[in-house]
Amino acid sequence: MRTFNKDEVSKHAIPDTGIASDTGIAPDTGITPDTGITPDRKTIERVMIERHSAKVHKRLEKASVGIAGLGGLGSNIAMALVRVGIGKLVLCDFDLVEISNLNRQNYYIRHIGHKKSAATLEILSRINPYINYKVHDLYLNSSNYGHVFGDCDIIVEAFDNPKCKADLVNWVLVNTDKTVVAASGISGYAESNSIQTKKINERFYLIGDSVKRVMEHQGLMAPRVGVAASHQANCVVSIIMNKYN
C-alpha cells in the first residue's frame, strides 16, 4: 500500500475553513468536477491489480455486463461494477431523473430532468473514464433485448415493474445461453440479512427477501435498495470469477 509524506498530504488536503451551515444550505466546499486529479489508464490499472491481484483484475477486465434499468438498483450496481474494474458495461434506460429518485438512486440534484442513461454515464466516467461504456436510451422489451445485450456475458435485471422483470428473465433463459441476475422483494426497512442471493439454476440468480407485496409505509428506501444492489453486483463478480475456474 502506498504511503504519503507530509508534503503530499498537505498539497491535496481540503483546508479546514471553519464553515458550517445553520441555514439548511450546504456550504461551498470548493470541490468541482474539474478540481480533482485524473490518473492515467496505467495508474488506475496498477492500483486495481494491487487491490485485486493480476488474476482477478484480468478476468473482470475481460467481462461484459449488461444492466437493464438504471433506477435504484441499476444505478448503484453500475457504480459498484465500475469500481471493481468490469471491462465493458452496457447500460440501458429510457427514463428521466426526477426529484423523487434521489431517496435511493445514485444521482444528484444536478441530474434532475436529464436522461438516466446520460446521468449514469457522467457519474461512472468520473469514477473510471477508461471502462468501455455502451449506453442505450430506449425502452427495453423483447424486440430489442438481443440488440442491446447481444455481446454481454451476464445480464442484470434492475427494473421496477414486475412484469418487465419476468419478461426479461424469461427471454434470457429461453433465447440465450447467458446468465441473468435479477432482484425482487427489496422494499422497506426490514433486516438487511433477510435479503439473500439464491441460485435458481445454472443461469439464473435471484436476490431479495421473497416477500411478494410491499408493506404499508414501507416503500423503496436507499439502505435496503443498496443492500440488494450490492448483492447483485457481488453476484456478478462471483459468477465471473467462478465461471472460468
Image (cartoon, rainbow, N blue to C red):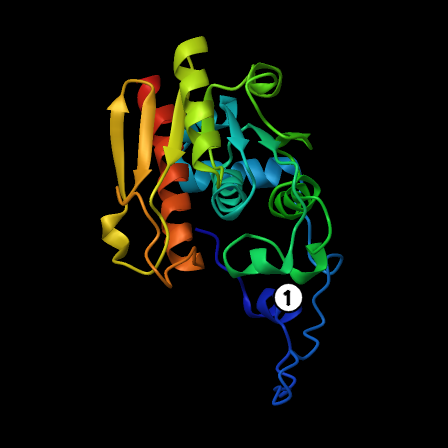
Q: Nearer the viewer, residue 141 or 228?
A: 141
* Residue annotated with mark 1: 12
Q: Residue at x 41, y 19 (%)?
A: 170
Quadrant position of residue 200:
top left
Residue 171, above or below 93: above
- The reply to whether residue 176 is in sight is no
Where is residue 191? Give x, y as percent.
25, 58
Q: Callout 1: few (<14), some (14-19), or many (20+) C-alpha neighbours within 10 Å? A: few
> Which percent across, then down, holds residue 51?
42, 42
| Quadrant in the rendering for residue 111 | bottom right
| Residue 41 seen anywhere in this rendered image of the structure | yes
- Residue 76 vs 99, above or below: the answer is above
Q: Residue at x 57, y 23 (%)?
A: 141
Residue at image position (71%, 59%) is: 110
- Side of 162 where 40 appears, left or right: right
Vertical arrangement, residue 23 with respect to residue 159, above or below: below
* 34 horizontally vs 196: left or right: right
Q: Quadrant of residue 184?
A: top left
Specify the amino acid type for callout 1: His
Rendered residue at 35%/60% (across/down)? 216
